[in-house]
Amino acid sequence: MKRILIVEDNVTLLQLQKDWLQREGFEVITAMNEPAARRLVRKRNFDLILSDVRLPEGDGISLLEWLERERRTVPFVIMTEYAS
């Protein structure tokens, strides 16, 4: 089973994404900020990471940069609900 990490601080959006992906057969793990996401990535392997750009502690860009420094090659999608 493919494992996806969703990093999103909007609880409603997070739950929508999680529910949809689980219905499609994916294992979904969630984090609401960058430090929590880093802890999860250190402990588990993921097939995909979906991350919001703006997070309460850190952001999606710095999480992606950290993954590159750690030499972790995982597909990474940055999302935002902001129009600007």
Image (cartoon, helix red, strand yellow):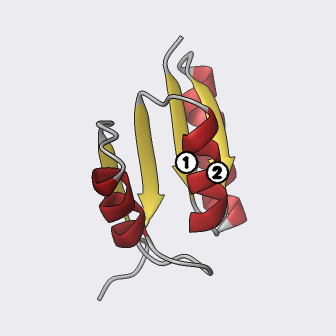
Q: Which residue is mark 2?
A: 39
**Residue 18 makes an appearance in the image:** no
Mark 1 Cα-neighbour bin, 10 Å: few <14, some 14–19, many ≥20: many
Q: Using the rendered image of the protein, determine whether residue 74 is visible from the camera's viewpoint.
A: yes
Report the residue at 44% width, 49% height from top: 50
Of residues 18 and 76, the one drawn nearer to the viewer in this rendering = 76
Front disc: 1 or 2:
2
What residue sits 47% from the left and 78% below the top?
A: 54
SS class of the residue under badge 1? strand
- Find numbered disc 2 in the image and state the secondary structure of the residue it sits on: helix
Residue 6 appears at what percent x and percent y?
A: 55, 48
* Quadrant showing the C terminus: bottom left
Looking at the image, residue 42 lies above or below residue 14:
above
Mark 1 to mark 2 CA distance (whole Å): 13 Å
Could you tell me residue 57's position as x and y percent? 60, 79
Amino acid type at image mark 2: Arg
Taking the spot 34% from the left edge, 40% from the top edge, the residue there is: 72
State the quadrant of the N terminus.
Answer: top right
Q: Residues within 10 Å of mark 2 (few under 14, many from 20)?
A: few
Please state if 41 lies on the left or on the right of 65 as rendered.
right
